[in-house]
Amino acid sequence: MSERFDRTVRSWRSKVAISARPPFQPRSTLAAVLLFVLAASARGEETKRDNANMRAAAPPAFTWAGIYMGINFGAGFPSHVGERLQAGSGFTTTAFDLYPPSRERSGVTFGVQAGYSWQFGSWVIGVGADFNALEGRGGSTGIFPAPPAYWPLGVHSYTLSYVPSAQYFASFRTRVGFAVDRTLFYLTGGVASGGARSPATLVLNGGSGGDIFMAEMSQSSRMKYVLGAGLEYAFAETWSARLEYFFLSQSFNTQLFDNGSSFQYFTRTRNENGILRFGLNHNLGPHYEATGQHEAGADKATADADESDQKERYSVHGQSTVVAQGYPKFPALYSGKNSFTSKGQASAGSTTDLFMGLRLWEGAGAFVNPEVDQGFGLSDSTGAAAYVNGSVAKVGAAAPYLRFQRYFLRQIIGLGGATHGNADRGSRSELLEATQNQLAGRVDKDRVILTIGKFAVGDVFDDNIYAHDPTTGFLNFAFNTMAAFDYAADSWGYTYGAALEWRQDWWTLRGGLFQLSKVPNGLQIEPVLGRQFMGVAELESRYELWGQPGEAHFLVYGDNGYLSKYDQVVALAYATGDFPPSIENLRKRHLKTGGGINIQQQLMPGLGAFLRASMLDGRYETVDYTDVNRQLSMGVVAAGALWGRPRDQVGAAVAFGGLAGPQIRYFANGGTSVYIGDGALSYSGEKVTELYYRYGVNSWLDLTLDHQLIINPGHNGARGPVNVFGIRVRAAF
């Protein structure tokens, strides 16, 4: 297959998650520019090393290039220690404000960090992430005296109770430094997370009713960030110690307390801290370093022969994708809550990811994937069941925000015998490439793979090298997974679970169990193991057709959770006269099933085709993916090597989707769901075409022009068609 459809499609094997993800604001380009610089620096460093070898230059006393991992400890000092619950709706004066004692105080911090650095000359540029506990933060819990304004009401005290939650902060940062011999002076900055207040309860003791106020977790729409400086000293060949100070802003958090009777309190907490800490790092070197080293003076031919057996001990990859999309005015007889606005719109957003992996023991690796998201999808990521942008996060925000989307363990157990020193090694083993969330090295062709932790269902299931990764290929949902595969996920597309793969000769059998979201399409994953979950199984068959390789995947799944039946929801609306029907009212435990087939077929070296067909039980509400009952999608992808542009790629595809009767009745009566709901429905199946051309600027940067035509968006013949134009810029290393 021309090295599996040539090098331009190797990124498809990385199985980056298909999350409903969103678009850009001016600051979103910073992450992409940063990765452009880093990748360019990396390439410059490779060239410099080659030149240095040619000149036989002496190695530096210490090199900061490569991967580092370590621990840190220190102290945090809050900038604001006051506490105030402000009397809001229902209250007539600020005399009813409450002032519980503040829990904000200086406290201990400790954690872990990891990252990767490039060095050219004395300058060092790097990226890294850390996760840390931070003591002494959070809301007060206890019984406190009430202000005098409450005494005439019989209230002399109040009880405030916060749910215990982790006190932590995390960051995804860059650093720029200057090395003087074995000392590195640096500046650092990036996006942070943490600092939110947990859910809480406020009770006015001695009141006459309506005295219980409930609050959800605090929210913030502002950017959380860190800025600082430090120095690091290499006291041994692979060990260094650092001292750093930075300012941590976990934003301006707002929390609302409501008693359900038009009375409210709210808190606004400015969560800012100075952090002084020490760190100890183990500098591991370049991430292509092998587990073993060749002896000095060894025969070069022997070393070259053994190179294919080298195993990547550590892995660091990164990518930043910026997508801008827009569409002109289109005809629409009416619009609803989840409609594309018919007047035309433009929006954009970005995702920036760091993929870090560490080999733990033979066949085992640990992986962490911090991600920074920013921006909004078109119409706030609604308007079409086959949504137009799968490359950026559905949960939009004007300010960049950080989440650790993946953290999982993977164990590979070989079934094909030893992989070293065998004459038939080429037929019994396979060389895994160095890519995102994978450690390069030779493994048995026949093997068992166990993955457990937090990751995306699409990382393991429903793969297709021609249509799976929206950061490099098709953008529309319809082409990157089975649309009727209503897989478990939070609103970003990730969940906790375990998957087992058994690969044998021409087939692979996969199975997995994953937690559903707490409520359908919710931000939170079900916290109780096994209370709401999805089971999924897939059989993959590998074959040759007319001398060209192909694969067929057969998938079935079941969502076991608290779901509403569409017809019951509509019946209740008619019985009560309460329209539009509310999907939240009748959730009970149900099992929603579905499945499909996924085919990829090489037509000739550099040219391939794909087809997906899927269907689900349309009686139940959408759980975590998109609003489709059945869909057929197909397309072709060609590598630029066919016309002398090996870094380029072109793709064209079409999809036909539809709804079941219960879904049609629900949307016709004004219902809304995850992605669609126009307030009414003139039902007609949704149809999508997409055409893109990806221009490879160089080995680390590409630019894509994209056009999508959506006929009957939201399965509604009274609206559209919609022409969506897009530009995608992606940098990766």
Image (cartoon, rainbow, N blue to C red):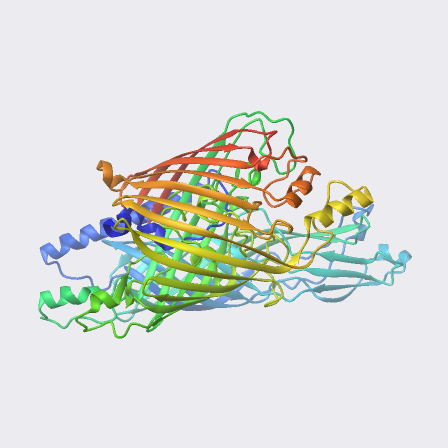
Residue 534 relative to residue 9: left or right: right
Residue 324 spot, x, y in % from top left: 45, 36
Quarter occupied by residue 541: bottom left
Q: Which residue is located at x 10 percent, y 58 percent?
A: 56
Residue 327 relative to residue 123: left or right: right
Residue 228: in sight, yes or no? no
Q: Which residue is located at x 59 percent, y 66 percent?
A: 136
Residue 110 or residue 587, whichever sits in front: 587
Residue 358: in sight, yes or no? yes
Residue 705 or residue 572, whichever sits in front: 572
Residue 366 or residue 249, whichever sits in front: 366
Q: Which residue is located at x 78 percent, y 48 percent?
A: 94
Q: So how many labels did they put on this image?
A: 0
Residue 631 spot, x, y in % from top left: 51, 44
Residue 78 spot, x, y in % from top left: 57, 59
Residue 497 spot, x, y in % from top left: 51, 64
- Which residue in the rendered view is the most extreme toward the front? 546
